[in-house]
Image (spheres, rainbow, N blue to C red):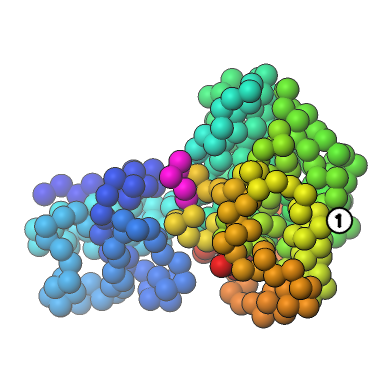
Amino acid sequence: MAIAMINAKELYEKINAGPLFILDVRNPEEYNDWKIEHKNVSSINIPYFDFLEDNEDNYKDLPKDREIVVICAKGGGAEMVAELLDERGFTVSYLGLGMIEWSQFYHPVTVAAKDNMKLIQINRVAKGCLSYMIISDGQAMVVDPGRHTEEYLKIAEQENAKIVDIMDTHCHADHISGGPEISHKTSGTYYISTGELQGADLPHEPLEKYDSIKVGSVDVKVLAVPTPGHTPGSTSFLINDKYLLSGDTVFVGGLGRPDLGGKAREWAQSLYDTVFKKLADLPDSVMVLPSHYASPSEVNDNGYVGALLGEIRKNNEIMRTENRAEFTEMVVATAGQSTPPNFEEILQINIGAVEVTPDKAAELEIGPNRCAVHHA
């Protein structure tokens, strides 16, 4: 039998096509911390080194009636195990560059295409990171881009659009922003709230100077009052009064964690004001499009992560807790749980204080999103 090497895009297509069995041969700690999860995926963890022993028990729980996809960290171990399975008559393929490649896979989905505007959500599936491109009249704005800048340049080229604006809703803690690099490559303007930069001298245009920024004929409203809580300078963007790019402030299933700056109780107060004062006037019909998600179940029937603000208010307990003291205690109770690994170093990179190689950047970003912790 032939052993097929597949890439991340092909794996994503297999996952969405129907039931898939994954054999993950990384060590148990890596598997338990971060693995491929989806309603269509069944997975088992048998470490690579177990297969170095000639023990047939390693194979007894593996199905012979369907394909097995073998996955490891970088691909080499998976290939070796796939060969052993092939020798025993299993139908097998393996992810060529492993979880490193899976971590860097982006999947674009069109959220809306009308009124001379196209809004695309770009899903970095393995990280649960979401970024956006707004296109109008041949111009494009990118919001919360990841560090793989070629993904955004490719989409802009496909859409015959020039990137003129790049926005970060806040200084991200779990992944490296591609905003400054896209700005350098396109001569587009990079926007972020100055308060997010901790005094660092990163070239940018301060978001706090603007009430509205236009791209083509689309009115991108920078909310007149910022939406702090997850970070002090978090800013949300309202597109055509219909779509709220909420950063890490409001998620489909909850609110952004306020504890990464070491001031959980203080920032929880800001988060309360954001929810019950600054966003209170937005109608239930606004579509919330966040910068992260915690589970594949948050992908809606249209293939993107988003929900009406009214649904989020209805379904999430903390969004209904109008008592300030109770709200604060609920938020603080979850503070400090599962902080993003390497978040302090990633923050330093994102404010321009530290530079790293692409290999080091990939190493720092390995692991799941841990910015969305307040769920219903």
Q: Nearer the viewer, residue 80 or 341?
A: 341
Q: Quadrant of residue 242?
A: top right
Res. 348 in view: no
The residue drawn where x is 31% and y is 59% is: 41
Horizontally, residue 163 falls left or right of residue 130, namely right
Tell me the chief SS of the magenta region: loop
The residue drawn where x is 30% and y is 65% is: 43
Judge whether 309 appears above or below 138 on screen.
Answer: below
Please provide percent x and percent y for residue 363. 55, 61
How crowded pointer 1 is (Cα within 10 Å; few <14, some 14-19, many 20+) is rated as: some
Horizontally, residue 195 falls left or right of residue 135, namely right
Q: Nearer the viewer, residue 330 or 230?
A: 330
Res. 31 in view: yes
Location of mark 1 (residue):
195
Numbered label tally: 1
- Looking at the rendered structure, the kind of residue marked 1 is Gly
Q: Which residues are magenta?
A: 299-303
Q: Quadrant of the C terminus?
A: bottom right
Please provide percent x and percent y for residue 306. 56, 48
Q: Quadrant of residue 17?
A: top left
Please provide percent x and percent y for residue 91. 15, 54
The residue drawn where x is 85% and y is 60% is: 198
Does 131 appear in magenta? no
Task: In the displayed orientation, state which residue is furthest to the left.
Answer: 89
Horizontally, residue 305 falls left or right of residue 219, namely left
Dot 1: what SS?
helix
